Image: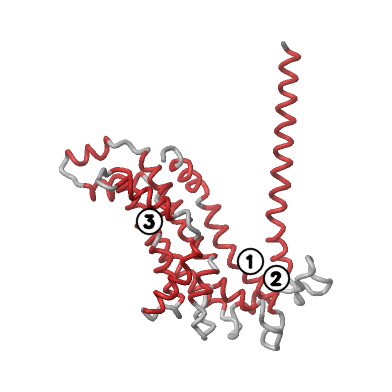
Amino acid sequence: MAKHVRSARAVEKTRRVLVYVILSIISIIWVIPFLYLIFQSLSANANPGSFFPASGDWTLKNYGLLFSSTIAPFFRWWLNTFIIAAASAVLQTIFVLMTAYALSRLRFKGRQGIMKLILLLGMFPGFLGMVVIYMILRLFGLSGSVFSLIIVYVASSAMSYYIAKGFFDTIPKSLDEAVLIDGGNKNTVFWRVILPMSKPIIIYTVLVSFTGPWGDFMFASLLSQGASDMAQKTVAVGLKALLTTAPSAALPNPYGLFCAGAVFVSIPIMALFFWLQRYYVEGIAGGAVKG
């Protein structure tokens, strides 16, 4: 019996070591691109074909040039992107939570049909409608403004209600009934009872709604193509333009500037995720209990 227990413990220990080794290898692979960006951003002569800066090329000038260059107004790109992402996150969170609550708590005619239709529409890739969306915005004179991205991101946000609905399904309906008996209504239940209890799913929705617009390139590139002013771009589009910029006296190292901008852009998202990671996991776990 003791021999069998020792054998089982040895197998379990070997399994854990193997899992940790595999996870460590995966983590190293994931972090390599970020390390590459950091090293290239610290190079005075950044070269896409090298990993480490050459001896004597280490510098911080790329980071200083990010906020001093008038040709590549990085701070304006960053501000545009932050405004778009923050506004989209707030509006998307409101629409997603309201839609999820309605489909979780209310029983009305056509409810199942709406849920099936949303599920069906969600199977189509978003880029299929990019040209149509661009033409519609063009009719209203919004195609040259990056702030029209807020409309694009928010318009279909209610279709991402699934996780939030699963979370609301785990909250006892007896709470709703108690509020209704005391003279409250559905608005009172949602705003004063359900939302205060839903911090994990609120933070999860805010994070997802913020990170999408923050790193989006396809829609941002399409809608900003009519803008000739470099300041009217998002971070992703502006940094992409640096890759096709020839070196000059004002921008001696466009690729190094691109890498420095990429590092700077990733820091807020990383900090936000690590700060709210616990709520993010709770939101996913809570929303996955019921469908």
Q: Say if mark 3 contacts mark 1, CB within 8 Å.
A: no
| Lateral position of residue 5 relative to residue 268, left or right | right
What's the distance in space between the residues labelled 3 and 1, CA to CA? 32 Å
Residue count near mark 3 (Cα–Cα under 10 Å), binned few <14, some 14–19, many ≥20 = some
Residue 75 picture location, percent across and down: 54, 76
Which of these two is toward me, 37 or 113? Answer: 113
Instruction: Return the disc, 2 or 3, that comes first in the chain's sequence.
Output: 2
Residue count near mark 1 (Cα–Cα under 10 Å), binned few <14, some 14–19, many ≥20 = some
Q: Measuring 70% from the left and 37% from the top, which residue is drawn there?
A: 19
Q: Which residue has dot 3 on it?
A: 158
Instruction: Return the disc, 3 or 1, that comes first in the chain's sequence.
Output: 3
Residue 268 picture location, percent across and down: 55, 62
Q: Measuring 44% from the left and 56% from the top, which residue is drawn there?
A: 206
Q: Which residue has dot 2 on it?
A: 41
Name the kind of residue labelled 2 in the image: Ser
Instruction: Return the disc, 2 or 1, that comes first in the chain's sequence.
Output: 2
Which of these two is toward me, 162 or 59? Answer: 162
Name the kind of residue labelled 1 in the image: Val
Which of these two is toward me, 115 or 161? Answer: 115
In which image quadrant can residue 69 be found?
bottom right
Q: Quadrant of the N terminus?
A: top right
What's the distance in space between the residues labelled 2 and 1, CA to CA? 8 Å
Above/below status of 178 relative to 45: above
Secondary element at image label 2: helix
Q: Say if mark 2 contacts mark 1, CB within 8 Å.
A: yes
Above/below status of 150 relative to 279: below
Q: Which residue has dot 1 on it?
A: 263
Secondary element at image label 1: helix
Residue at the left extreme, as displayed: 183
